[in-house]
Amino acid sequence: MQIPFLMSNKWSITEPYKNTVIGQAVASLDKTFALTGEPVTDDIISTMTRMELDGKGYYLKRYTGGGKNLRRYIGRTRIRGEWESMLFFAEQGIPAAKVIAYGQEVQWGVMTRGALVTEEMPNTQDLREMVRDAHPGLKDRKWMAQVIEQLADATGKMHRKCFIHTDLKWRNVLVSQSESPEICLIDCPAGEKVLPFFLERGIVKDLACLDKVAKYHLTRTQRMKFYRLYTGHRLNTRDKARIRRILSFFEGRE
């Protein structure tokens, strides 16, 4: 028997997926945890599984703990952070993984399990995998120009809404492997809206995370183009000071 206030189970299906085959398959947290598929990743508190249904791919991110250390007991859980970030991106028109279902179970104030179900963006690679595989697209100026433009637009939209990703690395940017590439942001459990006072440092960290790999695989011209598209204007004194902070952010930590 569920005792009010001591146990709660909140589960939601997003509107486009209600009354669909996948919506019925993940209609509850119990059903979602019972599903099987191809293991993708796992750690001590979560697993990622890929499954197919009616010819489409889906990802099940399932947690059995709120987070590591104190995050297990206080503050927003990692799985909640993941679904809130993805839903925020959708609201703002930022390309990101499409959320099908999400929720968590809490007992005695502690999250015991939770899940996020997203639709697969087919035929994609993350930017880090493209570097690993020496993907020819990285050397194709026209192809990369499309990626850079989309990523600059997505990052700018986030920051103008005072939202900081905190882990905006190449591995968290998927790119469709087509003549006209499309990006998709994934894996953002620590993303959050911040007060204006804290925004600038978050901006610098996000841009530094992107540039940490970009400086080895993109030209200076491409990197500057990204920044100009991101700001929407030519460089001014404030931009130059920010760029210096971006370039020095990871000094001594690489």
Image (cartoon, rainbow, N blue to C red):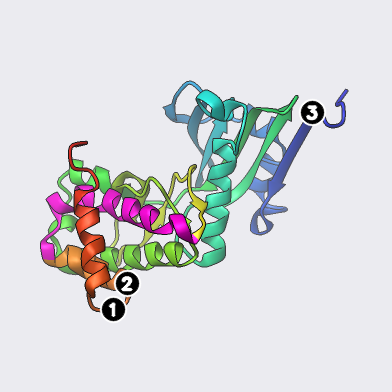
Residue at image location 18% in from the left, 50% down from the top: 135
Report the residue marked by disc 2.
231
Residue at image location 46% in from the left, 30% down from the top: 38
Mark 1: amino acid: His
Residue at image location 13% in from the left, 49% down from the top: 216
Residue 140 picture location, percent across and down: 14, 63
Task: Tell me if residue 201 is in the magenta stretch.
Answer: yes
Residue 183, quarter of the rendered image: bottom left
Mark 3: amino acid: Met
Numbered badge on residue 233: 1
Q: Say if mark 2 contacts mark 1, CB within 8 Å.
A: yes
- Mark nearer the N terminus (2 vs 3): 3
Numbered badge on residue 7: 3
In which quadrant of the rendered image does the N terminus lie? top right
What span is colored magenta in the figure? 196-220
Label 2 and label 3: CA atoms lie apart by: 46 Å
Report if residue 140 is visible in the image: yes
Q: Nearer the viewer, mark 2 or mark 3?
A: 2
